[in-house]
């Protein structure tokens, strides 16, 4: 145990770099996922059957196939077709598309949950479709999106150990190096559990703050005791 603590202390700079890479991948992937979620979420409400149908097929493809396979396909199979992405780009694209597909259902559901009277009132006021969405519908829907988006963000963080499989020196990669060096498997994986838990707790607190701010803007309060 003493040897592990000594090596852990010596490896702190590398572990810190691993944490940075993990957080960086999570943030970049979340940004892509948010764009994908809104894009497909809006398309899913299109009045055109062809648009809705093709959107549903695309979303279900990314939801119904393994993130592991999607990541490996981008990293190993895509170069065979003549396209090569950097490992981090592969991760961001794979995570963004996969979690964005799940997020699109959150967007669609939140928009559908806005009372029809709100849509009709915005039309009666002569607002354009963009004005209706920006000023009336989206602020109400956004409050409902935040909790499930927060859950998806934490799930994304917990999926980042896959990055080490495509040569990215993330937290899992650095801790596995430490495990190999010391031979202390139990201590190494206990340490990584604690670090991931701390990161997830930080993300959870951040999303709760975002939710509270959104509710305050809507005049709903926090709903807490």
Image: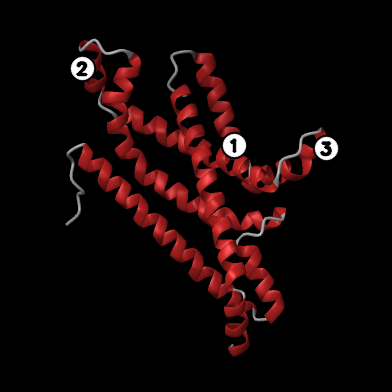
**Does dot 1 land on a helix, a strand or a loop?**
helix
Q: Disc 2 and disc 3: Cα gap in Å?
A: 54 Å
**CB contact under 8 Å: marks 1 and 2:** no
User: How crowded is the residue under tag 2: few (<14 C-alpha within 10 Å), some, or many (20+)?
Assistant: few
Q: Is residue 15 above or below residue 53?
A: below
Within-10-Å neighbours for mark 1: few <14, some 14–19, many 20+: some
Q: Residue 108 location in percent, x, y? A: 41, 30
Q: Is residue 2 left or right of residue 222?
A: right
In the rendered structure, the answer to whether residue 221 lies left or right of residue 67 reads left
Q: Give the mark toward the camera: 1 or 2.
A: 2
| Residue 168: x %, y % from top left | 67, 55
Q: Are marks 2 and 3 in contact (CB under 8 Å)?
A: no
Horizontal relation, residue 97 to residue 142: left or right: right
How packed is label 3: few (under 14 Cα within 10 Å), some, or many (20 or more)?
few
Q: Nearer the viewer, residue 101 or 38?
A: 38
Location of mark 2 (residue): 121
For residue 80, the mark is 3
Report helix, strand or loop for mark 3.
Answer: helix
Q: Residue at x 51, y 33 (%)?
A: 36
Q: Quadrant of the C terminus?
A: bottom left
Q: Position of residue 81 (x, y in %)?
A: 81, 33
What residue is disc 1 on? 62
Find the residue positioned furthest to the bottom: 2
Q: Nearer the viewer, mark 1 or mark 3?
A: 3
Q: Secondary structure at mark 2?
A: helix
Of the two numbered discs 1 and 3 on the same chain, state the one appearing first in sequence. Answer: 1
């Amino acid at each position: 145990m003493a040897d592990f603590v000594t090596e852990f202390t010596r490896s702190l700079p590398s572990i810190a770099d691993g944490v940075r890479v993990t957080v960086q991948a999570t943030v970049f992937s979340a940004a892509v996922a948010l764009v994908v979620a809104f894009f497909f979420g809006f398309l899913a409400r299109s009045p055109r059957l062809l648009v809705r149908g093709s959107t549903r097929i695309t979303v279900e493809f990314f939801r119904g196939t393994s993130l592991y396979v999607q990541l490996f396909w981008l990293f190993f199979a895509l170069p065979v077709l003549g396209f090569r992405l950097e490992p981090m780009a592969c991760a961001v694209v794979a995570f963004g598309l996969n979690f964005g597909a799940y997020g699109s259902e959150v967007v669609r559901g939140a928009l559908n949950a806005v009372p029809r009277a709100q849509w009709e009132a915005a039309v009666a006021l002569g607002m354009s479709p963009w004005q209706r969405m920006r000023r009336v519908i989206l602020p109400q829907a956004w409050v409902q999106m935040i909790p499930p988006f927060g859950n998806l963000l934490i799930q994304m963080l917990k999926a980042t150990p896959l990055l080490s499989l495509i040569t990215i020196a993330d937290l899992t990669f650095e801790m596995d190096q430490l495990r190999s060096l010391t031979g202390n498997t139990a201590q190494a994986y206990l340490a990584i559990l604690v670090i991931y838990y701390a990161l997830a707790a930080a993300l959870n607190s951040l999303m709760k703050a975002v939710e509270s701010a959104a509710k305050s803007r809507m005049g709903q309060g926090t709903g807490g005791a």
